[in-house]
Amino acid sequence: MVWAGLSDDDKKALKEAAIEAGKLNRELSVKADTELREKMTAAGVAINEVDQAPFAEKTKSVYDKWSKEYPDLVKLITTEAAK
């Protein structure tokens, strides 16, 4: 496996880069979503807000599983998603 062959420094650098890339991706996604919602609303499209709690409950086991292996990443994902 390629990951196993990497040095600890390389693994750390890749993890940090992935976290930064994830943050940037989230920022760009939120911006694009906001702009698209504004355009759609201006065009007369009605946007229905959905209760996300049932979806969160159904995916809880996935977060629990991956939290054990990648606690920092899962924490970052859940924190960013809550914004």
Image (spheres, helix red, strand yellow):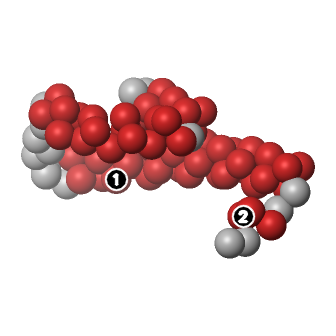
Q: Quadrant of the C terminus?
A: top left
Q: CA distance from mark 2 to mark 1?
A: 38 Å
* Residue at the spot of label 2: 3
Residue at (74% x, 63% y) in the render:
4
Does residue 68 appear in this view?
Answer: yes
Residue at (80% x, 46% y) in the render:
12
Q: Secondary structure at mark 1?
A: helix
Q: Quadrant of the N terminus?
A: bottom right
Q: Position of residue 48 (x, y in %)?
A: 11, 41
Foreground: 40 or 48? 48
The dot on residue 36 is 1
Q: Position of residue 25 (x, y in %)?
A: 56, 51
Foreground: 19 or 44? 19
Q: Secondary structure at mark 2?
A: helix
Left or right: residue 45 versus residue 3 is left
Q: Residues within 10 Å of mark 2 (few under 14, many from 20)?
A: few
Mark 2 vs mark 1, foreground winner is: 2
